[in-house]
């Protein structure tokens, strides 16, 4: 892909100038016995990820003699780091990537292709669920990554707060969610201000904002690329964003301060302290136990549906892929690390720890039979769709996601934008992506 396109997605990933620490690692590895690995933050804290990954990587070292230098990077920074590495040539040997970014990163030409011969080294492509493998490339092209962890959005609800509010079951439709959210939003201290809220949001993260917008818009029939051309401003897309903003604005079931939440940890903390009754988040697994919640304290249900006349969409197929940078000086070692991470044993250990679902078919089912895992699997089978598998996906995610976070910030101050304001800016963003500007 040309330099102009790469400059476009770099600009989309960060309007800021230089990024500190971006060039700390190098693919030009002077020591072939050491692999550099950028892992994505999968749990509420970087320390928690290190506690999960470091023992497994030591096991890899014991088996292979290859040491792994691990860096865990928050998803909010990871795309910028990767894009900078693609232009500087200074990146890791192996890197985790959000599976929705794969087509955009594929367009840079920086990632190694996983053709049939490469796939054979890790057991073959048939080991992976078909829809998960589809996220490893743009449509109709050779994969440039391998599925590692898989997630879908689910509804988590606080059983205690539901019982106290007389809400006897989780909402099945979005109308039900708002109705329940109003019953669950309360002033419990008598000071005239709500301190318990129906729904918690991670409002400042552009990735999360885009995910909600995409799910809600797609459930109304929105298509964001038509024949490869951006089409962000359909009435269905606008309506989905209006719905998201209205939870905080018109419906008043979300704390306005949630517009400042940059980390899911803020939402999990509020949920665990009975300040939030519902969360719409990707599969959590162990995470809520880390906040002191036993399974009898919360329930897990499918994401509500749009009715009547909507599509039955509850989530996109989210998750994390693992890739190898082309400029690695230890391709055999990097391939061996990917083989290790996607082995049955490690897939069970890591997906159990992160509460994700293995994309590997031959991973044992015994560890994934909780109610949470069953809801996730059913959602993936029946109600999940991929994000657009186009080279402009990262630009779409960044530009539209940042727009939605700014609209939510305005909503928090009582200035929810109108449908026409939303449509106009989306139209402008569509034109920007179409023109490559």
Image (spheres, rainbow, N blue to C red):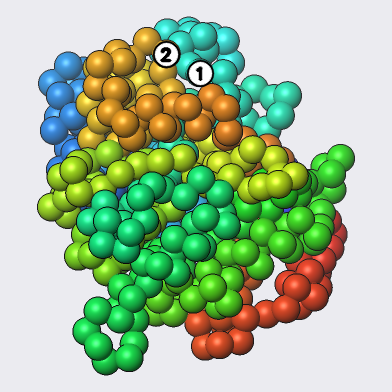
State the residue in front, 356 or 323. 356
State the residue in front, 261 or 119. 261
Q: How many marks?
A: 2
- Vertical side of 403 occupied by 157: above or below: above
Q: Quadrant of the N terminus?
A: top right
Residue 5 picture location, percent across and down:
73, 53
Q: Residue at x 64, y 48 (%)?
A: 306
- Vertical side of 44 occupied by 313: above or below: above
Q: Quadrant of the C terminus?
A: bottom right
Q: Residue at x 57, y 83 (%)?
A: 410
In the rendered structure, are the residues bearing label 2 and label 1 in contact, judged by CB atoms less than 8 Å apart? yes
State the residue in front, 92 or 88. 92
Q: Residue at x 56, y 54 (%)?
A: 174
Residue 202 picture location, percent across and down:
42, 64
Specify the farthest residue to the bottom.
Answer: 191
- Vertical side of 41 occupied by 351: above or below: above
Q: Which residue is mark 2?
A: 361
Q: Which residue is mark 1?
A: 129
Residue 283 picture location, percent across and down:
37, 41
State the residue in front, 370 or 166. 166
Q: Residue at x 32, y 63 (%)?
A: 165
- Locate residue 262 relative to residue 313 in the image: left or right: left
- Locate residue 329 relative to residue 139 in the image: left or right: left
């Amino acid at each position: 892909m040309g330099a102009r396109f790469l400059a476009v997605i770099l600009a989309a990933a960060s309007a800021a100038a230089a990024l500190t620490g971006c060039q700390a690692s190098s693919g030009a590895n002077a020591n072939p016995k050491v692999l550099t690995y950028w892992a994505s933050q999968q749990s509420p804290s970087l320390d928690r990820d290190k506690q999960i990954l470091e023992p497994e990587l030591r096991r890899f070292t014991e088996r292979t003699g290859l040491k792994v230098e691990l860096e865990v990077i928050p998803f909010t920074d990871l795309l910028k780091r990767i894009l900078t590495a693609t232009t500087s040539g200074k990146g890791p040997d192996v890197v985790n990537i959000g599976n929705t970014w794969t087509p955009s990163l594929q367009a840079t030409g920086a990632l190694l292709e996983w053709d049939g011969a490469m796939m054979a080294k890790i057991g073959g492509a048939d080991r992976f669920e078909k829809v998960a493998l589809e996220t490893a490339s743009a449509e109709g092209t050779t994969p440039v990554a391998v599925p590692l962890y898989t997630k879908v959005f689910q509804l988590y609800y606080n059983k205690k707060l539901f019982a106290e509010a007389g809400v006897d079951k989780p909402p099945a439709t979005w109308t039900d969610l708002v109705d329940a959210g109003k019953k669950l939003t309360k002033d419990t201290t008598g000071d005239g201000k709500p301190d318990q809220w129906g729904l918690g949001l991670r409002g400042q993260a552009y990735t999360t904002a885009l995910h909600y917008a995409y799910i809600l818009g797609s459930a109304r029939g929105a298509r964001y690329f038509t024949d490869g051309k951006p089409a962000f401003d359909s009435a269905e897309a606008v309506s989905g964003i209006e719905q998201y903003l209205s939870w905080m604005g018109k419906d008043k079931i979300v704390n306005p301060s949630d517009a400042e939440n940059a980390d899911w940890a803020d939402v999990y903390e509020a949920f665990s302290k009975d300040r939030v009754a519902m969360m719409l988040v990707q599969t959590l697994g162990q995470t809520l136990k880390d906040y002191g919640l036993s399974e009898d304290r919360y329930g897990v249900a499918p994401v509500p549906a749009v009715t009547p006349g909507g599509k039955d969409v509850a989530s996109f197929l989210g998750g994390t892929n693992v890739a190898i940078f082309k400029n690695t000086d230890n391709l055999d070692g990097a391939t061996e690390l990917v083989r290790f991470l996607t082995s049955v044993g490690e897939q069970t250990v890591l997906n159990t720890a992160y509460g994700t679902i293995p994309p590997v078919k031959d991973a044992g089912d015994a560890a994934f039979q909780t109610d949470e895992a069953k809801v996730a699997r059913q959602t993936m089978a029946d109600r999940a769709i991929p994000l657009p598998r186009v080279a402009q996906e990262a630009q779409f995610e960044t530009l539209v996601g940042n727009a939605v976070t700014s609209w939510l910030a305005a909503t928090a101050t009582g200035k929810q934008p109108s449908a026409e304001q939303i449509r106009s800016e989306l139209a402008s963003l569509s034109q920007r992506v179409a023109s490559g500007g």
